[in-house]
Structure formats: structure tokens, C-alpha cells
Image (cartoon, rainbow, N blue to C red):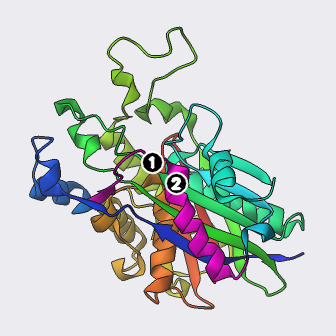
Amino acid sequence: MPYAHITGTGFYLPPKVVTNDDMSKIYDTSDEWIVERSGIKERRFIEGELGPSDLAIPAVEMALEEAGITKEDVDLLVFATLSPECWFPGSGCFLQAKMGFPNIGAIDIRQQCTGFVYGLSIAEQYIKNGVFQHIVVVGAEVQSTTIDTSPEGRTVGVLFGDGAGAVVVSAKDTPGGILSTHLHAQGKYAKELCVPEPTSTRNPKVSPGGKGLHAYMNGREVFRHAATRFPEVIREAMEKHHWSNDDIDLIVPHQANLRISQKVAEIMNIPMEKFFSNIHKYGNTTAASIPICIAEAKREGKIKPGDKIILASFGSGFTWASAAIQW
């Protein structure tokens, strides 16, 4: 059985920086208010008409170069996003066309904040079962064009940003790589964090006024569940491989809220220095946040060969997931 290794990483952030002071021109808010509640100082927004597949291109190119392969070597695309260009088809098909990949499969993942880890689990299985040699897994989001700029949208609108991250997962004979993935969902809380429209349950799909087009979030409920599920799913990965807190070199959580990561560190008695964080720079980039973190951490020397790493995410659905990796 081959091992599934991450052989290439890449990321891309739009050049437009939007600070909390900029957001205070849209909402009745302030830098102090946003930082205290989320840890976010700034985020990136697109300019012009761009979709998640456009942002994914430079991230994928970077990952392919690091992996030492070309697009012709790739056997499958897995694309995670909550902000696709169209109702259908998925963004994976747009990326396949724009980059000129061969006529390989393109799987789109609709797991929002946990989408990248879910996508990584798919790649892990295809590689370990000997079906494919190289798989590109992408997380990319354009969320700035959908935020609610009315006063009611303040608590959600200040959190999100645009960006893309990508990895190449390759088959190798060397032990290690993606050791295991752990996926969970609890759908009874689905409406606590959702975009309720457009909906196929009625005609017209969008109600007059279209307010449902914007995200609804029960912030207290999300925080409460995240503070429970993050430690659970991190421990699940650790126990699978008999890792202790001391064994872990780095935890890469989904960048939802710095307060959540701090709470998880406190609950697990793991120093914050072992939690990678860039939310202050980019905000919540949803499916893109973990691959962006991985790519940055690697370039900052915080991921080295042999390191034991855990990826962890929680989000809409509710869904939560983790991955244990020995780099």
C-alpha cells in the first residue's frame, strides 16, 4: 500500500488589503471591537470580477512547482468552496478548463469550513488504495462579494475574506504522510450557520428582498460547539496514533476565530505556540484557511520533515474533522 504524502503546497491572497478601519466605514464597528471578538486585524478582498477558481490558479501553480510535477501528471482535482462561481457546475470544472488540465475528474466539496480536510480525506483514500499517483486538493473562496453590508450584517461581515490554498497529495513508498483523517457531522444544527437562499424547496428560489442570500450565524452556538468539537477531533487523531501533547509539533486549526483557538489550547493544555495562526492577516477564508496556513507555515520553517502535525476544522453543518500527518 502506498503512502499519501503532501508533496506541494501553495497559496494566493488578493492584493487588496481591507483593514478594520475600512470595515468601520461600512458598519458601526471599530478595530478594537473586531480584534477583541475575533483576533482579525485585516482581510483580503478581490477587485473586479473573479471567482474562486481564478484565485486557485496561482495557488495550484505554486503547489505543482513545489511538488516537481506538471498539470499533465495530475490524476484528480478536489475543490472545496462555499462560494462557487455558479449554482452549478462546480468550481473544479472551471479550474480544470482555465489551467488546461487533462480530462481528469473534478470533485467539488460542499463542507464549508471543513471542506479542505474532507477533500484531503478523499485524496488520502485514492492514493492509499493505489488508484491515483497525484491529486490536487484546493480550498478557495470569494466571500467579499456576498457579505451583508446592512447594519444586521455587522457580526458576520467583518469576519470573512478571500483567498486560496492548494496542496498536491502524491503516492510514495516512504512511510508517513497523511496517516489518518476523521470526519463528523451533526445536521440538526445546520441552520445555525447557513445561507438559506437560494433554495430549491420553493419557486421563486429567492424571496423578495433576497436577504437570505447572506449568511446567518448564531455566533454563541457556533462558538460553544466549536470549543467542544475542536478538542474532541484533535484528541481523536492523537489517540489513533498514540501521540501525546509533547509529540505534536504543530496544530493547524481552521481560522475561524482566534478566541476559539485560545480556548482549545486552554482546554487541551497545549501552548498557543503550537497553534499556527494567521487570522489577524486574512480573516476567515473558510475552505481556504487550512491550506493557506500549511503553505505559509512551511515557508516560515514551522513545518519540517518528520514533524507531527494535526489539521482540525469545525464549521457549518455542523461538521468537524481532523487529519494526522507526519511530514
User: If the image is split into quadrants, where does the N terminus sit?
Assistant: bottom right
Q: Crowding near pointer 2: few (<14 within 10 Å), some, many (20+)?
A: many
Where in the figure is residue 213, as x and y percent of width and height? 40, 27
| Left-right relation of 52 to 27 | right
Circles 1 and 2, Cβ within 8 Å, touching? The answer is: yes
Q: According to the image, label 2 marks what residue?
A: 54
Q: Amino acid at mark 2?
A: Asp
Q: Residue at x 21, y 54 (%)?
A: 37
Task: Kindly identify which numbered label has been placed on residue 275.
Answer: none
The picture quadrant where one finds residue 193 is: top left
Q: Crowding near pointer 1: few (<14 within 10 Å), some, many (20+)?
A: few
Residue 67 within the magenta-colored segment of the rendering: yes
As drawn, 48 above or below 243? above
Q: Is residue 140 visible?
A: yes
Q: Nearer the viewer, residue 211 or 145?
A: 145
Where in the figure is residue 326, as x and y percent of width and height? 65, 82
Q: Residue at x 76, y 74 (%)?
A: 170
As drawn, 208 above or below 233? above
Could you say whether the residue bearing mark 2 is in a helix, strand or loop?
A: helix
Q: According to the image, label 1 marks what residue?
A: 50
Q: Which segment is the magenta one? A: 43-69
